[in-house]
Image (tube, rainbow, N blue to C red):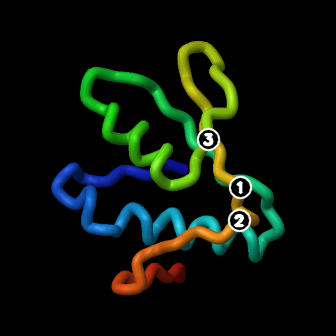
């Protein structure tokens, strides 16, 4: 439900690998979109940039929260040097 990462690891590809894994999982489960809620604060503009860089598009705004979604059916390039698995 929540996707939190330390600012110390942003930019190393882990966040992109996880999004790629989730998109793959969504396709396997015949889901059309990944959806993300974004609440603007002074410190999280980097999160908004990340969403835009990873094929999430602004969908709508609800009570001050922006909703982004990514088409899970489109291919998504993820880092080859990181493998994400689920147990």
Identify the secondary structure beneath mark 1: strand
Q: Are marks 3 and 2 in contact (CB under 8 Å)?
A: no
Q: Sequence-wise, which precedes: disc 3 or disc 2?
A: 3
Q: Position of residue 61 (x, y in %)?
A: 63, 21
Spatial separation of the CA atoms under disc 2 and disc 1: 6 Å
Q: Position of residue 52 (x, y in %)?
A: 49, 44
Residue at 21%, 50% (x, y): give it: 7
Give the residue at mark 3.
57
Q: Is residue 86 left or right of residue 15?
A: right
Give the residue at mark 2.
74
Residue at 27%, 59% (x, y): give it: 11
Q: Which class describes the residues within 10 Å of circle 2: few (<14), some (14-19), or many (20+)?
A: few
Q: Are marks 2 and 1 in contact (CB under 8 Å)?
A: yes
Spatial separation of the CA atoms under disc 3 and disc 2: 13 Å
Identify the secondary structure beneath mark 2: loop
Give the residue at mark 1.
71
């Amino acid at each position: 439900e929540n996707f939190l990462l330390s600012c110390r690891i942003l930019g190393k590809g882990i966040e992109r690998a996880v999004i790629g894994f989730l998109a793959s999982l969504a396709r396997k489960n015949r889901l059309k979109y990944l959806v993300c809620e974004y609440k603007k604060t002074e410190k999280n503009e980097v999160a908004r940039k990340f969403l835009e860089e990873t094929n999430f598009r602004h969908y709508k705004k609800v009570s001050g929260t922006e909703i982004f979604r990514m088409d899970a059916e489109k291919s998504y390039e993820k880092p080859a040097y990181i493998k994400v698995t689920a147990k």
